[in-house]
Amino acid sequence: MPDQDTERKRLLDPISRISEILFGLLMALTFTTTFNVATTGQEPVQTMFYAALGCNLAWGFVDAMIFLVQTLTERGHRVNLLRRVRTATEPAQAHRMIADSMPMVGDNLTVTDLEALRVRLRQMPVPLAYARLTAGDFVSALAVFLLVVLATFPVVVPFLFMSDLALAMRISNGIAITMMFFAGWGLGRHAGFRPLWTGLCMLVLGVILIVVTIALGG
């Protein structure tokens, strides 16, 4: 069973970090580009700042809660899998469960490999009756919240220092799609894709959101 250090490593994984940032940017971009659609477009810039900041805080909170739910669900699945492997009546049945739990590796494991894993799993301590969250999980959730809020904060900065709402919105949109480009670059580099192309794909996605919203009256 993975320990808390494994959970923290997962949180610090580049894909996890960049995905959190991308989700936050998409949420912030969607909110800022639709603000004029839902209002008269004459609201003070400060109103937009507080509204956008509130959106970022809300999304950070939602993302943190989703992280906790995902962590608990995955941990419960592992506990259940370990219990099923330990109680399997036939070694072949346990072998299938072990192989299915490792889709990238299972097909290349021999019966000897699978049996060694089965024996090792049976020697492990009896798993908990049910999965539960730990204090470290809540610390990690707080880290997710801060990551999303801090990563998307640059998008709301123009509304803090500018008096022209329309100009502030355009600059904010520009910051968001620029950050999306670099986030896509990071994802592409980590995944072995062409960083430039993945960055451009994310940039194009941001531009599409803006163009569609403006066409609808944003």
Image (spheres, rainbow, N blue to C red):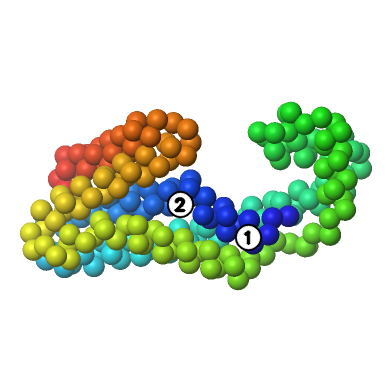
Q: Is residue 42 visible?
A: no
Give the percent coordinates (x, y) of residue 79: 74, 54
Q: Which residue is mark 1?
A: 5
Left or right: 90 with respect to 217? Answer: right
Q: Residue at x 48, y 36 (%)?
A: 191
- Badge 2 is on which residue? 17
* Residue 107: quadrant of the picture: top right
Q: Who's the residue at 30% across and 48% down the image?
A: 179
Count numbered badges in the picture. 2
163 sits left or right of 17 in the view? left
Q: Residues within 10 Å of mark 2 (few under 14, many from 20)?
A: some
**The quarter of the displayed image where residue 164 is located:** bottom left
x, y percent for residue 3: 68, 59
Give the residue displayed 20% in from the left and 39% down from the top: 211
- Is residue 86 positioned above or below 162 on the image? above
Amino acid type, mark 1: Asp
Side of 5 where 24 appears, left or right: left
Identity of the amino acid at label 2? Arg
The residue depicted at 83 percent of the width and 46 percent of the height is 85
